[in-house]
Image (cartoon, grey):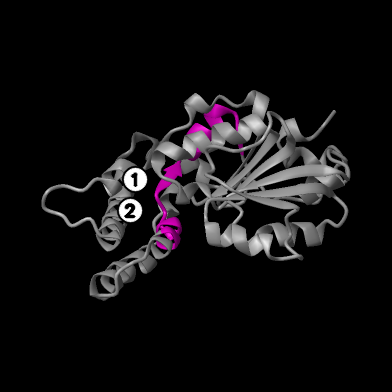
Amino acid sequence: MFKEMQAANVIQNGVSVIDVGCGLGHQMRLIKDALPGLFARVEGIDWSPATVAKHQNDQHSVYDKVTLCGSDKLPCLDQDFDFALSMENLEHLYGDRSIGAISEMMRVARRLIVTTPLPSECINFAWIYPEIVEAILDDVPLSEHDFICLESAVHKSTVFPSSMVDAGFTHLPKGHGYYCGNSSAIDVSLIKCVGVDERAVYAVDAFENSSLKTRYLKLLAHSVELHKSILASPHHQAMQPALQPTQQPVHVADERKRSWMPKIFRGK
């Protein structure tokens, strides 16, 4: 996306970016290496203490700064960045936090780029079923650190493409949940999301023990149930046309060739 916008003279060198849910920064590294000189300031946000510590102790981190916080409460000034990125992050948030994360990105940046699995691809059954079996059979208690790492890996929510488009995003023809938009043109209230209820995972009734392993198993079970909620949603059928890419992205050299690019990102 950045490469196409640079080629079309929509953006110039000196771009500021905040990467929300940055993880280890592999994707950001690929972007920066492919576009040397484009970015003047790149900051990361992550809620894993271990991830943030790794960046802070790495003199060669891809980020100028990495802050420990949740995606829905960014410690940034309004419109402080040119772009907010959320690359494969929303699906790892509980349902009630996904919309909040998008709202916060709109607040701190002028443009948003979001990538996340399509609803039908949100739950990876090839991973989750063996994980449930392994978690049941493993008799080693989970530490708080272990639970945080495991919890962050589980997919907990999804947004429906048709609602993202209704809200003002452009769904790019890349065969994935790949969205971009101008913050000023997005109505977050129109975004439809289904997800795991964080309160249900953390609640403990009289018949349960309060171990972190029990909590993790509940999370895995709720993640499986999320797939049923996705299929039952009236937005599931509405999204089907959005899954069919109509054009392949092209390298843009003139107005005709860059017509696939979202109008809001083309410039004049």
Measure the alpha-carbon separation of dots 2 and 1.
7 Å
Q: x, y percentage for residue 254?
A: 88, 41
Q: x, y percentage for residue 208?
A: 15, 55
**Residue denoted by label 1:** 196
**Residue denoted by label 2:** 223
Q: Is residue 196 above or below residue 238?
A: below
Give SS at disc 1: loop
Residue type indicated by callout 1: Val
The span picked out in magenta is 148-170
Graded by Cα atoms within 10 Å as few (under 14), some (14 to 19) or many (20 or more), the crowding at tag 1 reads many
Query: Quick check: is 209 in the magenta stretch?
Result: no
Q: Are the residues at dot 2 and dot 1 in contact (C-beta closer than 8 Å)?
A: yes
Res 8 quadrant in image:
top right
Give the position of the C terminus as an image quadrant: top right
Q: Is residue 31 above or below residue 45?
A: below
Q: Is residue 62 left or right of residue 6?
A: left
Q: Is residue 254 left or right of residue 176?
A: right
Q: Residue at x 62, y 37 (%)?
A: 75
Give SS at disc 2: helix
Q: Residue at x 29, y 74 (%)?
A: 140
